[in-house]
């Protein structure tokens, strides 16, 4: 028998990590979806606040869900759910980072709308936006609980050709 050296890919982490990632992802998705339909500012819920509120100091209303911050939040939640298909959790981390980026963009515009006063901005940003922040953090944590793939050396024994003396007998 001949031994040949190869590298094998092995997943690390037990089922506890996968269950933790599942629970964190589901909690993060729930926070994003619930927050999408709650108040973001005193005058609008997330499903009525235009998506322009992320890049302009304009908190106008919008009736089409696709063009709202709530709709974008739901889309990010769907991406996080799709991340459960892959065991490594990279798509869940990406969704968490997108949710955090969305909150930061909204917070900057809230600061501009509420007169460059930090205290007013913090108090006038409502629970829906804060759930966006918490949901993004939970998704990031859940994404890091995914399985890790490690390359390890492995020796494989290959069968050798039968010797001539055995086959001729």
Image: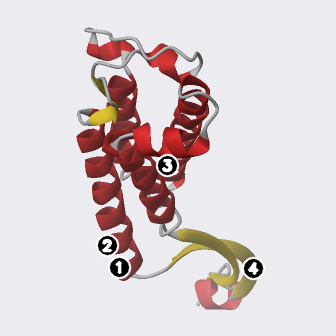
Viewer-side label of 4, 2: 2
Which type of secondary structure does the marked residue at label 1 adopt?
helix
Q: Which residue is mark 3?
A: 96
Q: Relative to 30, is 77 above or below? A: above
**Of label 1 and label 4, which has the lower sequence position?**
4
Which type of secondary structure does the marked residue at label 2 adopt?
helix
Q: Relative to 141, is 129 above or below? A: above
The CA distance from mark 4 to mark 3 is: 43 Å
Viewer-side label of 2, 3: 3
Res 15 label: 1
Q: Residues within 10 Å of mark 4 (few under 14, many from 20)?
A: few
In this picture, residue 26 sits left or right of residue 5: left
Kindly check if marks 3 and 1 are in contact, taking CB atoms under 8 A apart as contact: no
The N terminus - image quarter: bottom right
Q: Residue furthest right?
A: 5
The CA distance from mark 1 to mark 4 is: 32 Å
The CA distance from mark 1 to mark 2 is: 6 Å
Quadrant in the picture for residue 78 = top left
The CA distance from mark 4 to mark 2 is: 37 Å
Viewer-side label of 1, 2: 2
**Of label 4 and label 2, which has the lower sequence position?**
4
Q: Relative to 158, is 94 above or below? A: above
The CA distance from mark 3 to mark 1 is: 22 Å
Kindly check if marks 1 and 2 are in contact, taking CB atoms under 8 A apart as contact: yes
In this picture, residue 11 sits left or right of residue 84: right
Q: Residues within 10 Å of mark 1 (few under 14, many from 20)?
A: few
Front residue of this view, candidates 109 and 132: 109
Q: Which residue is mark 2?
A: 19
């Amino acid at each position: 028998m001949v031994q040949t050296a190869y590298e094998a890919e092995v997943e690390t982490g037990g089922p506890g990590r996968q269950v933790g990632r599942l629970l964190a992802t589901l909690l993060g998705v729930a926070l994003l979806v619930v927050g999408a339909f709650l108040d973001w500012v005193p005058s609008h819920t997330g499903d009525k606040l235009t998506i322009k509120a992320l890049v302009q100091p304009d908190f106008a209303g919008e009736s089409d869900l696709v063009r709202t911050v709530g709709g974008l939040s739901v889309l990010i939640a769907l991406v996080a759910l799709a991340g459960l298909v892959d065991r490594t959790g990279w798509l869940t981390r990406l969704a968490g980072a997108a949710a955090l980026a969305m909150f930061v963009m909204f917070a900057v515009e809230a600061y501009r709308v509420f007169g460059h006063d930090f205290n007013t901005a913090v108090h006038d940003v409502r629970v829906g936006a804060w759930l966006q922040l918490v949901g993004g953090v939970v998704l990031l944590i859940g994404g890091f609980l995914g399985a890790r793939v490690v390359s390890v050396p492995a020796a494989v024994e290959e069968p050798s050709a039968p010797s001539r003396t055995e086959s001729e007998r």
